[in-house]
Amino acid sequence: MIGAREGAFTAFRRVLARAMGAQPRVIVVPGRDVAVARGLDLIAAGLEPVASPRHANVLLIVGPLHPQLADAAATLYAQMPRPRAIVALGAENLTPLPPADVVCALSQEGLREATQALQERFAAGAFSETVKDFDAPALAVRVEYTCPMHPEVVSDEPGNCPKCGMTLVPKEAAAAGAHDGHGEKREHGANAAHAGHHGHGHQHGQKAHGGHQAHSGHETHGQASEATTYTCPMHPEIVRNEPGQCPICGMTLISSDSADSPGGHHGAHPEMGSDGSTGHGAHGKMDHSARGKMDHSNHGGMDHSAHSAGTDVPGIEPNFMSMVEMTKDLPASGDGLRMEWIDVPFGPFHPGLPGGLTLTLSLDGDTVAGAGLRGLARAAELQAMLPATLDDLRGALQGLSPHNAGFYVALLDHAVLAALGETTDLTVESAAIARLRLLGDLRWIAGLARLKGAIDLAARAEGLHRSLQIGHGEEIRAQLAQLCAKLQRAPVFRPIFSAKGGPGPTPAERLARMAQDIAAFADRAPAETAAPAHDMTGTGEAVVETGRGAARLKLTIKAGLVTDLQLVTPSQALAGHIAHITMHKELGEALAAVCLLDLDPWEVAQ
């Protein structure tokens, strides 16, 4: 095994290796929903699906590996603990992944064969005294430099912060071009920020009474020197006679005039106690009218020098560190508060999203302030192959998406019939389309149930999907109706199916349509049309209703060749509503809203 764990194959490790191979824990690429769409039953084959690469020892590649998922798959593999293996079902080129340990056909039988082969691989090679490190371009890191006080300041080169003058500290970041959703190298930005403060805790502890020590010179306070001194807001023990930077943190030194006037810590002091002390025993005699004049120059380690000449505001002392001033250049959230936003990617293998879909959410603290999608749309490939024969185009449409290939073929056949001026048996075709819709509905229900933690319901939906897929629909028609009724009664789904409005069919509308399809579907695929004559010329258009909405195809045929086509999928229209349906929602609610749309990553553009 290429992913063997380093170490001698002792007797104990042989037992451990056989146990690992007995029920491998797999993480699926592009996702478990794709495995279901391909008709695979992972549990029946003896595999245990897991959501995290940290818990997996097998990377299962289902179907050809999309080029845009290659780097993310490599990162996922690198995050898996050794010993680890790769199983490829119907996949050939896995670059930049290492060669697959097991290669089998993309079928349930092929999956069973792969499971048996895995047991042999683990038993024979889970441990090795010589192992080779896995490396890929996606795993490379580059060094960035950031300010510990202002993390939004990022530079590719060492230097000083343009806001506070502090020395920028290094941190690791993913190399350019690496996948931004999963990083093999964990972000060390927080640690790097702390590195910029290395030793501060001890220095502050040793100078805990620095303020009291400064009082030792108060007997001459009235005879203030005309000379200006400069100090560090972070390290008040640093005092210089000229401007510069702190030798400890690199922060710009500020003048003592800025620190002392008009609210410096020398403005007023408690009266001397009877014991000659100025400590807390004399606190009761302190003039609190001057309390606002205490030195805040090093409060919290922030640089207040920028506020030394602040505008006088009634009720607020001059030089006060205003949060309004600090956040004035930051974007405003929905509630009007200004704060720093962060962009967080989810996917393309996030367990709560369709496999292959990358969702990027801009978070303003508690809620979502913006959203973006990146999919795997391959419509450009169809345009690139034109002009094409009908058979070539049908083959391309069948491989366009693992989720909706049947709909694409039905669209093509109906459009060709329209170009020929012919009609089809709507009763027969509607029954076949209803079956395709039910298959998509069951996958949608399984994903939604898994997101809500209803694992038993998800397994039930996946089981009914397999039965319907292999032609046992008549035997499970009653079970399908029971599933719909259970969804309507389940408390966890009640808020979902009672929701009104939204893009595309609402969950309640989709469930109602599903009940109609259960009564109308037939255990057959849509019939293929005869190939047009070689000299045929014409234009045809077709519309097919999917569970997500309407799909449309318009094509032009000249001399028997398709010279132009326009394919509009429901996911393309739904993707435009992502920002609206996630805006101002908490993170969990936003992910659930995206899951409800049931987007097909192969229909979503970049």
Image (cartoon, rainbow, N blue to C red):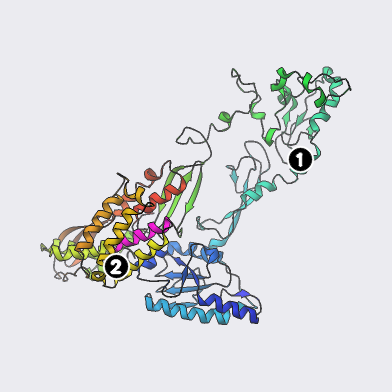
Does the segment drawn in magenta span residue 556?
A: no
Q: Looking at the image, which is closer to me, 281 or 59?
A: 281
Give the residue type that dot 1 points to: Pro
| Residue 133 coordinates in the image, percent (x, y) | 60, 70
Q: Nearer the viewer, residue 249 or 497?
A: 497
Q: Main secondary structure of the magenta part?
A: helix
Q: Is residue 30 left or right of residue 126?
A: left
Task: Name the image quarter holding the C terminus.
Answer: bottom left
**Residue 167 on image: x %, y %:** 68, 42
Q: Which mark is residue 247?
A: 1
Q: Residue at x 80, y 33 (%)?
A: 210
- The residue that mark 2 highlights is 398
Residue 446 located within the stretch drawn in magenta: yes
The relative height of residue 127 versus residue 296 in the rendered view (above or below) is below
Region in magenta: 438-453
Q: Is residue 456 visible?
A: yes
N-terminal label among 1 and 2: 1
Q: Is residue 302 left or right of residue 273?
A: left
- Quadrant containing the N terminus is bottom right
